[in-house]
Each structure stands twice: as C-alpha cells, then as structure tokens.
Image: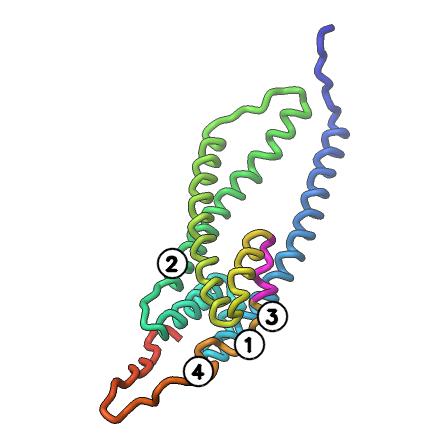
Amino acid sequence: MQYMPYHYSTSELELLMNAFWIVMTIGLVIGGLILLTFYIFSSIGIYTLAKRRGYYRPWLAWIPFARDYLLGGIADNIQFRKGKNSYLRQILLGLSIFYTLAYIAYAIQALQMIPEMLLAIFQGQNPTYGNSTMMMMGIGMFMNLLSLGYTVVNYLALYRVFQEYAGKNALLFLVLSILFGIAPFFLFAIRNKPAASELPPPPFYGNPPYPGGPVPPQQPPYSGWR
C-alpha cells in the first residue's frame, strides 16, 4: 500500500504553529519560575556568606556573572587563609561569560531553524539541513565543553564552601548537589553557620609552649579581591 503524505491546509498550519508556540511559552514560563527560585536562594546564600566574610560588595551576588566571581572569591579566600593560592573566581567568571555568549548564538540559530523544519514536515516535505545545522552542531559542541569546565570548577568552589561551613556534611552536600542540583538550597541553609576558621581550637592536652619554643605562624591578611 503506497503511502500518500498528508498536506495540511493553511488554517491547519496556523493552528499547529500557534499550538507549538503556546506550548513553548508555557514551558519557558514554568522553567523560568523554577530557575528564578533557585537563583533567589543561591543569591541570598552567597550574599550572606560574602557579607559575613567582609567583602565590600556582597550585593554582587544578585548580578549574573558577578555572582560566579563572588562565589569563586569566597572559595579562594578560604584557600588563601590556609596559605594556598587559588584563582577560581577568574575561571568561573570567564567560563560563565563565554558559555552565555555561545548559548545566545545557539538559541538564535535554533529559533530560526525550528519553525522552518516544522513547516516543511507539516507540508509533507523533507526538512533540509545546511550550513545552519553545521553551525548549530559546532556551537553545541563548544557549549558542552564550556558547560563541563564550568560545572567542574563550580562544584569545586561549592565543595570548598561546604567544607568551611558544613563540616562533615560537605561531601554529602556536594553529592546531593550533583545528583539533584539543589546546591542553592544548601548555600541558603549554611549562610549563617560559623566558618571552620572561626571555630575555637580544640582543647589542648599536651605540654604548654615553653619560652623560646616554636611559635605558630601568624595568619596572613587576605590581599585578594573583596
């Protein structure tokens, strides 16, 4: 039995395209509300942590890109107080900017291609794949690399923050954040917890230091970005 492709009328095409955009709009609204909730919780957490650590501009936690820099700065500050150098703030800022630019380029290409492909399918034609498809594939691969790098560095920064404020629960918080993406709620939960560097030292049961004995090194002041 020979298959005869069905050709949609103009009114049917308009109805299908309107339905497509309605579904897309609803999905974007729901997704936007979820992302907004996560953004608010994480921003409150980062803002409070930065303010408690003495940063001059904790309100940067509410600004895209700058909040990545601020989170990396908190993680770098934690390492610096341990006598270690760290540059997560610059890496996070660069990756987030480049990923956003690539995402915008990908979205523009997709918005141009999807309606054309759907229209061709509805008219019983085979959609054509040209330079736009190749460009989307290239941008997509570049985005995947940027996303992977950003994810690794972001979770490294989060783990350092969790170690400082969540103690023994740091690894658990990290694993749950990776599996379920709930790091914003953990940042919100630990925002008022005392930092490990602020806790009193454990009781000393050994011999007290004698005159002329070794003196523990003084904590260097933080000279990084604040």
The three-letter code of the residue at mark 3 reads: Ala
Residue under pointer 3: 189
Q: Position of residue 190 (x, y in %)?
A: 57, 71
The three-letter code of the residue at mark 1 reads: Lys
Which numbered tag is attached to residue 201?
4
Which numbered tag is attached to residue 91?
2
CB atoms of marks 4 and 1 within 8 Å: no
Residue nearer the viewer, 201 or 128: 201
- Which is nearer the N-term, disc 3 or disc 2? 2
Looking at the image, which residue sits at the far top?
A: 1
- Which is nearer the N-term, disc 2 or disc 1? 2
Question: What secondary structure characterizes most of the magenta part?
Answer: helix
Nearest to the eye among marks 3 and 2: give it.
3
Q: How many marks?
A: 4
Which numbered tag is attached to residue 18?
none
Nearest to the eye among marks 2 and 1: give it.
1
Compared across the picture, whether 32 is left or right of 51 comes to right
Mark 2–mark 1 Cα distance, whole angstroms, equals 27 Å
Q: Residue at x 58, y 24 (%)?
A: 127
Q: Residue at x 49, y 31 (%)?
A: 133
Residue nearer the viewer, 212 or 160: 212
Mark 4–mark 3 Cα distance, whole angstroms, equals 24 Å
Q: Judging from the image, what secondary structure is the residue with disc 1 in?
A: loop
Q: Judging from the image, what secondary structure is the residue with disc 2 in?
A: helix
Q: Residue at x 43, y 36 (%)?
A: 138
- Which is nearer the N-term, disc 2 or disc 4? 2
Q: Which residues are the magenta region? A: 180-186
Residue 126, placed above or below residue 199: above
Q: In the picture, residue 208 is in which quadrant?
A: bottom left
- Which is nearer the N-term, disc 4 or disc 1? 1
Residue under pointer 1: 193
